[in-house]
Amino acid sequence: MKSLITFLSFLFISFSIYAQKNTDKGRVSGVITDNMNEPLPYATVVLKNIKKEIIEGTVTKENGGFTFTKLNEQNYFLEIQYIGFVSSEKLITISKNKKNIDLGKIMLNEDSKALEEVVVKGEASEVSLKLGKKVFRVGKDITSQGGMATDVLNNVPSVNVSPNGTVSLRGNSNVQILIDGRRSGLTQAQALEQLSADIIEKIEVITNPSAKYDASGGAGIINIILKKNRKSGLNGQVRLVAGIPNDYRALGNVNFKTKKFNVFTNLGIRYTDYEGEYSKNQETIKNGATTFLTQNEDENRHDDGKLFYFGTDYYINDKNTITLAYYRNETKDIDATTLDYNFSTPMNNKTSVFTLGNSKEKRDYNQLEANFTKEFDASDTKFTLDFQYDFWNSNKVWNLKTEQTYPTKIPIATINTRGITNTDDITIQTDYKTTLANKGKLEFGGKFENRNIVNEFLAEELKNGSFEIINGINNKLKYKEKIIAAYTQYSLKNNKFNFQFGLRLESTKVSISSIIKQLNLNNSYTNLFPSATIGYEFKDNFSGQISYSKRIRRPSLWQLNPFIELRDFTAQFTGNPLLQPSYTDLFELSFNYRIKKFRLSPSIYFSDTKNVFQYETVENLGIFVQSPINLENEKRYGFELSGSYKPIKWLQFSGDFNAYNYKQTGEINSSDATISDKTWFVNFSTSIQIPKGVRLQTRIYHIGQRVNVQTTTLPITYMNFAVSKSLFKNNGTLILNISNPFNSSKIRENIVGSNYKINQIRNRNAQRFSLSFVYKFNQKTSDKNRSANRSNRN
């Protein structure tokens, strides 16, 4: 560890020393904003000599900032242009006594005439690469339009969504997913599949978060920003979708903004079918004899969904704003599953069993949020107070009928199960930031979160004409979690050098109780989570950063719940109430390089995790039970390369490559579970702009083989394809999406134990085809790049 830190520090300092040459030249910097003090990214800034001849040009960054360096002592004209705004020109002078000029904020005024006449011929890159952060704008990616949040995440650099819905960052599933900067029930496994891509503005990937963020997520944070606060006046869009398998949706969002109010709403309904296929070949050895099992499952899932998101911003005055919003996602699932089992015993006796399963589940997720933002006369001083209340209800009923079909047809069992879950989560958070006399920024804040979950599960079997409880599976579990947090961080940018140091305190109290099963467990822990970032801007288009943070992974209720839920009588999952939190120390060295046609962001990273989570599989009387456990440690070394290249106006390539080595140590089933291996994955996209408003896009994914001491997961390769056509003077768009066309997005696993071997394939979603039509009304081209900056909370 120490040798790695020493090496990275030496490398970073060497770059810094090299880059500090030529500091005797002049420098000009500034930030471009609109008349509401919002930054304007991708504005054109041109530097001319006294004869009005162009010397150098650039575009502003995401924060509206720009910088020119290595300037000679003379007079210059600085010209700023942005579509839909009145151009601005300034005269500046570089002299011996004034070589570094900071113009501060330069405000542009909207050109009302230009807004009505201008036609946008190009768009900004769909992925913005920043140090420690990648920002993916959903509107630029046609392969995820018309889909759900999981479809969008699968197109984001560094992120992967496995075929069974597990989200990972740089190959690590220990990732914290936030909605608008907060924990939310919408980020639970199945809930992300109900969140429409149409209401997502952008996704931020933060690989090494500062102390301001929650400490959860050893791999980092994925922050999903929902659409709101978009444009002045009345505007919005409507989307209609039809697909195969059955997929019918109608979605729309409308926004109305005045000087005092901004009202935003999203509405949607859907009728969607999903097809899944699963197979398993299992060998079990007992007393030298082998039993074989072949299992095939067909799954047909159907979802009826409704979503509603409504809110308003009230601008009390220029310095004070109140936001109120309500979100509701209502889903009704009807699933039908058929399972065929074929057994072969050591005596060559063969038996076939058939199970028919039908389930109905009603879910509704509700979220109330309120925000107060106060800005002060002092530069960049802001206070925010946030309140959020989530409540989630789920009621699921399973009916399972099993019968033997060979050698004779015999009814075996009729089983009914019911699962009810209710969640209440209250969060209060406050943040304050200000600029000090030395232009350093000080931030501090606090957070309180209280979560209560009640989970009930009942399993009954039909016997002698009446239902009886199976093996005492009648449980009501109560889960309570309280987190109190406080943080402070200080940052300073001095010319090309910048740094940020922070410290976060989190105190956690968790309790799990069950009267029926006489379970009462309590766990409390308080931790400090430091973070540090040091950055240097070698050139205007080349910068580097080294960072550190400490993270935590808390066990979820699903991982702690020790009571089994029945679905497949040969395989079961049970939680582990003794599971402890894991802690990760994360180091990263990253660079960002950009020229006109080329963007590149390489990173090397190292993580050291104690009490790492892993899953063990235990065989007991022919039933395989999987549960989570703590291993002692995992060390991971990785390299990541993200970039984009636009060689010509109508062609763009973008992609992400990640490779890492890892070593796990610990015990599984009292046996040494130490293992070392390496793997990699790549995400590559091609976008082609064809005349007459036609655009093609393909994405190809490959995930390498992954191994732990019990399970080998084989490589996966699949792709998505989309084509779009602009209509009605660019106000309408017709999009054809083909997802997983070769049906290759399958999880293939080989699980090996002391007396068994399992080969299984899980294909949760087969190929999908969809055709969608989008119509936008009253869209202002000048606002497209700044719409994501309107939120008070972000």
Image (cartoon, rainbow, N blue to C red):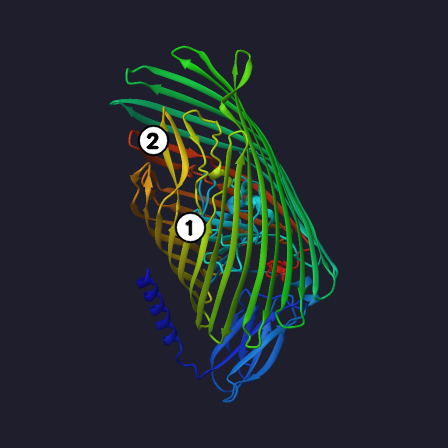
Q: x, y (%) of residue 365? A: 62, 41
Question: For mark 2, does the 10 Å Cα neighbourhood hold few (<14), some (14 to 19), or many (20 or more) residues?
Answer: some
Task: Say whether marks 1 and 2 touch (CB < 8 Å).
Answer: no
* Nearest to the observer: residue 448 or residue 170: 448
Q: Is residue 265 visible?
A: no
Quadrant of the frame with the N terminus: bottom left
Q: x, y (%) of residue 600? A: 42, 62
Above or below, 244 against 85 in this view is: above
* Nearest to the observer: residue 226 or residue 588: 588
At x 43%, y 11%, the residue is 409
Above or below, 312 against 284 in this view is: below
**Element marked by disc 1:** strand
Name the residue beneath numbered marker 2. Answer: 758
At x 53%, y 80%, the residue is 53
Q: x, y (%) of residue 591? A: 41, 64
Three-letter amino acid code of the residue under disc 1: Asn
Above or below, 329 against 159 in this view is: above
Residue 683: numbered disc: 1
What distance separates the C-alpha of mark 1 from that of mark 2? 30 Å
N-term-proximal mark, 1 vs 2: 1
At x 45%, y 23%, the residue is 339
Q: Which residue lies most toward the left here?
A: 288
Based on the displayed image, in which of its 4 quarters is residue 316 positioned?
bottom right
Above or below, 673 against 643 in this view is: above
Left or right side of 617 for 360: right
Q: Is residue 602 visible?
A: yes
Q: x, y (%) of residue 435? A: 58, 72
